[in-house]
Image: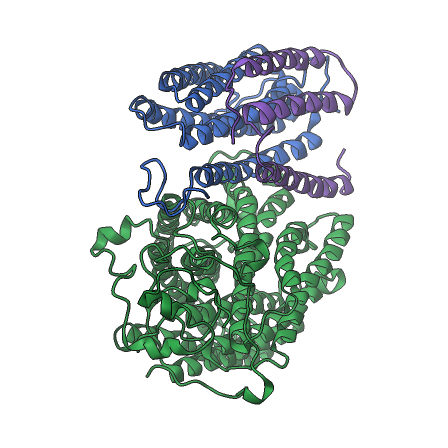
Amino acid sequence: MSMPPSNMSPSAEAASSQAGTTRSGLAEAARPPREHYLNAGYGIKSWLLTTDHKRIGILYLLSVTFFFAIGGLYATAIRLELLTPQGDLFQPDTYNRVFTMHGVMMIFFFLIPSIPAVMGNFLLPLMIGAKDVAFPKLNLASWYMYMIGAGFTMWSLMHGGVDTGWTFYTPFSSTYSNTYTTATALGIFINGFSSIFTGVNFIVTIHRMRAPGLTWFRLPLFVWAHYATSLIQVLATPVLAITLVLLFLERAFRIGFFDPAIGGDPVLFQHLFWFYSHPAVYIMILPSLGVISEIIAAFTRKAIFGYKFVAFASIAIAVFGFLVWGHHMFVSGESAYSALVFSVLTMLIAVPSAVKVFNWMATIYRGSIEYSTPMFYALGFMGLFVIGGLTGLMLGTLGIDVHLHDTYFVVAHFHYIMVGGAVMGYMGALHFWWPKITGRLYSGFFSHLSALLVFLGFNLTFFPQFVLGYMGMPRRYHVYPEEFQVLHVLSTAGASILAVGYAIPLFYFLYSLKYGAYAGRNPWGAVGLEWQTTSPPPLHNFHEMPVVDFEAYEYKEAPVAERQPYRVVKYGL
Amino acid sequence: MSDAASAHHPKDLAHHFESYEQQKQSSLLGMWAFLAQEVMFFSGLFVCYVVYRGMYPEAWALGSQELDWKLGALNTVVLLISSFTMVYAVVGAQRGNRKMIVWGLILTILFGGIFLGVKVVEYSGKWEHHLVPGPHFEWHGDPAAGKEVEMFFGLYFVMTGMHALHMVVGIGIMLVMIPLAWRGKWTKNNYNFVEGFGLYWHFVDLVWIFLFPFLYLLALAGGGGGH
Amino acid sequence: MAEHNHSLKPYVMVLFALFGLTALTVGVAYVDFGHPWSDVVALAIALVKASLVVAFFMHVKGSTSMVKISVASSIVGVLIFFMIILTDYMARGFS
């Protein structure tokens, strides 16, 4: 039994908290906890004025899902337009707005907050045995900032959107574009506060709120990943903020910050922009890496191989992430010298990423693998992340980038990282911790089905785009030569499968809220403090302050004879 | 964590903290993390400053000549004094002396207000001399440098404006703090907000320490400062 | 924990040191050290002033190592930011 023998009163709560690695979670499932955070208060005010990190996580979950749907609608529009070589659906400038709004919505209002603000908010205090994050009010403020920022962006969206691309390159964005650049930039500026608040909160929470006995090297890797993410959020986001301020001033008062016609340097804008936006890629992917570590440990029933390496790899990715932004600017007029240095540094950042993947593989090796839905997502993640990462190395190579820059190869590459990596991780996290968040189990069959559809649909959507890009299809065009059509049709077909894959969870998750079986504390038999408390957790997370006297991922390895490697557990429905 | 899980939770210790020390250290670290963010924010402006000054050294010297270094120096002194009065408030909080907190804050607002007043005088002078970037801008010196001098003033207004904005926000917060301090909101055990706000105010001072020489003092030594 | 002797005296001394350095930075501005030394001198004085504020007014001297690390990390962040962008401009041959 890996759980600590608790020295608290032998109440019913404490007794079942020692369920540990067994599946007794299912046995006690018939009975939900009497008090939990969801029934601690009712009414709209108890949600909108809550300082409970769990409820704020739920608020984020709802809003993030909404903006994911909006971004998805734009993606649908893009794929429909690209079904045929002619521009049947949109005028060129409309198409510009469509792909811009897709990028803005997905990046700033879905990917950046998705795992940190939803899963991180919900889980960090639980995982470290705290009652809440360090600054609960700041946490709530962060959600409001997010919503106000999203409000401005939605306003501009409803008035026609922006056509600059999500990168807002000057001087087009500052001088020529006659769309609602200012409102969108303001929305993103305000949204930046939400990101910074979350980052500050997590850094302090991880430093100061850990339960007694929970040393740094006993922390779940999810926590390490969020620590690294928070560092980036705090140090990089303000640079985007000031860049957007300067962009606004150039647009409003024609001060030559970036427009060469009035003295500015557009390359400086790109430097400042990518100083944020490249590390921002790691804001999106690092939390996913943390999620995958948790899932793989739980469903191979092994400790993560080389824990310290995986932990420090997160920190290394965060640090190196600040040194490689110039690989977005190889053909933008940065110096050959800088391009060379950035290219070399880009190779460097592959090392910690590869360390993680190798260590996961070593963890899976001879593990007692259980093909649960979260594990489906984790395995899918590993494959897609490797493809995304390796094509990233190709693009980081100077010569190849000159050929492939601004083609669909780039589009395919970053979707493999963002969707194949970050979104798969997010979906995995949602499936892994849904029983903890809601106290209910969801359909095993439909969740496996949707995970498969997502994986297949995703590959069908984006793999052809590698080929397209390599053949010379530029990004951001909606009219293309006829010989590209077959690949575009494949891609659009894949996108429809992907859309179905993303839509199904909406139904079985909602269904589970009312009809799902009770999950009990620990339906997966996973270790970690969050599984020791009831599901859903009580208002202050733990009835007794947990004391940690065990290492991270202390799974008891089952003897080889007892393993049932190819078992798919039936749960729910 | 000596007083962990004590039956009654003191009023000045938030529910999710176990001890005053944990609460204090959390507050301090949070403020420093926030200030790291502020540092990067202003760094973006300083990077622009350095890049464009490297491109247009003459225009920077010309622009700097239009600034009155005496007003800048006066404001430096005023702001340093306000930092000291802020320290006075924090020491008052450490001693549990609410009169000291209140007086410290009032004096800080006063000196912050003087700083902003001088800033208003400077800004309105620039407006009258058509040195505010935008359609109103006119340059009567070397016409070739006009656009570049306008960039200098663009950066001057953004940098000092962002700095002044931080001061306005700070003064707003202090106005709220004064009645709270008077009613004894901050105790010897928990004066974290006062201390955290002090850090913020000193940071504003820090920014000005760099702004002053690099905006006001470029052209004092002959044509100097430039390249 | 903070020390129990909450004296104002050291702060007064720091304040006057800062006044002195302000006068110094104005004074040296009248001297032409040539490029780039005028900037180096001005920057050095500003850094000394900033260190005084950070160490004494902001209590970094005598605070926990965690606070010191966060100060150091923001300095490292700034250095990375400046050095990488400025090397690009130097390599592009600006002044």
Disc tally is 0
Q: How is the image coloured?
A: by chain
Where does residue B197 sit, x and y in percent of width and height?
44, 29
Report whether residue A488 is seen: no
Residue A443 or residue A324, whichever sits in front: A443
Q: Colour of chain C?
A: purple
Q: Residue drawn at (52%, 75%), measured in percent from left and top?
A: A85
Report whether residue A327 is seen: yes
Above or below, comparing residue C71 to residue A548 in the picture = above
Quarter of the rendering occupied by the C terminus of chain A: bottom left
Can you tell which chain is drawn green? Answer: A
Q: Residue drawn at (70%, 26%), measured in percent from left and top?
A: B57
Can you tell which chain is drawn blue? Answer: B
Residue, far left: A43
Above or below, comparing residue B78 to residue A566 in the picture = above
Residue A496 or residue B187, whichever sits in front: B187
Where does residue B62 sit, x and y in percent of width and height?
65, 19
Where does residue B159 sit, x and y in percent of width and height?
54, 29
- Is residue A170 left or right of C76 when viewed as pictured? left
